[in-house]
Image (spheres, rainbow, N blue to C red):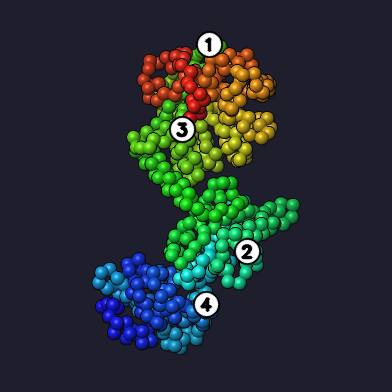
Amino acid sequence: MSTDSPALAEVLDATDAAFAVTDQRGRVRWLNRVMAQLVGLTAEQGVDRSLPALLPGAPEAPHPGVVVPFRPSGTDGVEDEPAWLDIRCTALTEGRLLYRVIDITCWRSQEDGGDLRTDLLRMAEEDPLTGLPNRRTLTRALEHQLALGGPGALLLLDLDNFKDINDLRGHPAGDRVMAMLANVLRERLSDGQTLGRLGGDEFAVVLPGADEEQALEVADRLRTAIATVPLVGGANSTSTTVSAGVAQFDSGESWQAVLANADLALYASKAAGRNRVTVYEQGHYMDTALRVTVLDRVRAALHNGHLALHAMPMVKLGSGRVVGHELLLRLEDDRLPGLGPGEFLPAAERGDLVLDIDRWVAGTAIDALVDHPYPGLRFNINVSGRTLEDEDFGGFVLDRLAAAGVAPGRLGFEITETAAVTNLDAARSLAQRLRANGCRISLDDFGAGFGSFVHLKQLPITGVKIDGEFVRGIDYGSRDTVLVQGIVDIARGLGLSVVAEWVERSSQVDALARLGVRVAQGFHLGRPEPLADLLARPQGSWMRRPQVIPEPDGHAANSSQ
């Protein structure tokens, strides 16, 4: 059967049934007059649109027939009374599909009196918690707007840290807050702007005819409204914020592409610190494509044994002896381009993959300590900010140490000051547990954050590592000298160890020694080497003074990498 015949198309146009021909993806190649009226479009507007999106409930593959409740909309956009539709999908040649739709409302109404139809339609179209249009209704509204050919914008809104409300106050309280916030959003939109709930704590708004400036104005108005609403009354009143992504559209795009673009912009808002609005641009796609590729590589490396640890010596400046090694992560999958930790760790830290990585690092370090029981062999490993939120990480480490019979003091943990401040309670909890069982805890990049000395009072740490920015010019008689001296004096008064990083010149060693710094690390004192190579040397040689290497040109040799 083919609709290419003028006579056949004329016949199908004259019938009372709705017909459409689509490709295998459901994109309309042809539709008759009744189908166009049913979905509220002209025949020309319907071509290239997604029929399953315009006709929610329609099967996406050959099917003998389904009956669905549906609310038709005329070409003027005014919705009619709910109807019952019988939808059949038949396979044609060349991978095409024929849809036949018959309105059977008059037959079904004799059975249900209309009430069942209305109830089922509400269940199919509305989010039960908020009463807003659900995902498929919003998809239909977006596809319909694209078919009409006018410009517009899609706005995605995602509540920031809403999970905390459910965790701290329970899901019933979270449901009440969600319904309240839905009303706040609904009250601040105009007629013709469709607000829906996509699921979870994510909302979407279809803005017909909106340009970028108008979409931003709507997004900022909604964001401000959410931020000013108290979620819980009384002395413990709190509020939440919302991140937003905006994607403009025209008739040439699919609803899937528009939604994906808005989602990329929303992700950019989240990554930039939340509580902001971002408009989609091509760079967001490139960033996300790169991030996904990087994550795939790291995930494969983790499972295939292509992650490795390199050991950087920490050297006692007075004697030149190595007192321990910081273990640094490397990706060694032999693929191009090569990726350093500064390129793949940020991507891993945005999701749960970094949790698996941190456990792999800890487990590998402990295994090495088991295989080489020399007491002087001590490792420091880095803990990501995301792992601080992993309530089971401390137990995982302590259980592995106990099962292996490794003295906890041989393993140290470094937490960056920025990560600790971002999640102070979690950092304090993990530090307390690990330190109470004998592990060493250092505050890395110390001095980089605001109020650094206050954190010494709040966190149960055993040492600090001075941020390399203060060490970079320590031999030039700069203000760094005063700051480092203050850090050393306070740490010594609190009984904390001090390590300086980014030592790249012999003159820095002399300057640090004069200020009382006893341990340092950096390319001048010893480059990172594969942990396997370090452990292959004779026992005890690990602690010997490493060979001093030539000073690198410039400051490219950042030892934290």
Coordinates of residue 547 in the picture (x, y in percent): 44, 14
Q: Which residue position is annotated with label 1?
A: 319
Q: Is residue 418 above or below residue 440?
A: below
For residue 12, what is the image quadrant?
A: bottom left
Residue, x 44% and y 48% (percent of image)?
A: 286
Query: What amino acid type should be assigned to the residue bearing mark 4?
Result: Gly
- Label 2 sits on a secondary structure element that is helix
Which of the labelled discs sits on residue 362, or is there none?
3
SS for dot 1:
loop
Q: Earlier in the sequence, mark 1 or mark 2?
A: 2
Foreground tag (1 vs 4): 4
Q: CA distance from mark 2 to mark 4?
A: 23 Å
Q: Residue at x 57, y 24 (%)?
A: 472
- Residue 519, how many percent across, how many down? 56, 18
Name the residue beneath numbered marker 2.
Answer: 185
Tag 2 near tag 4, CB within 8 Å: no
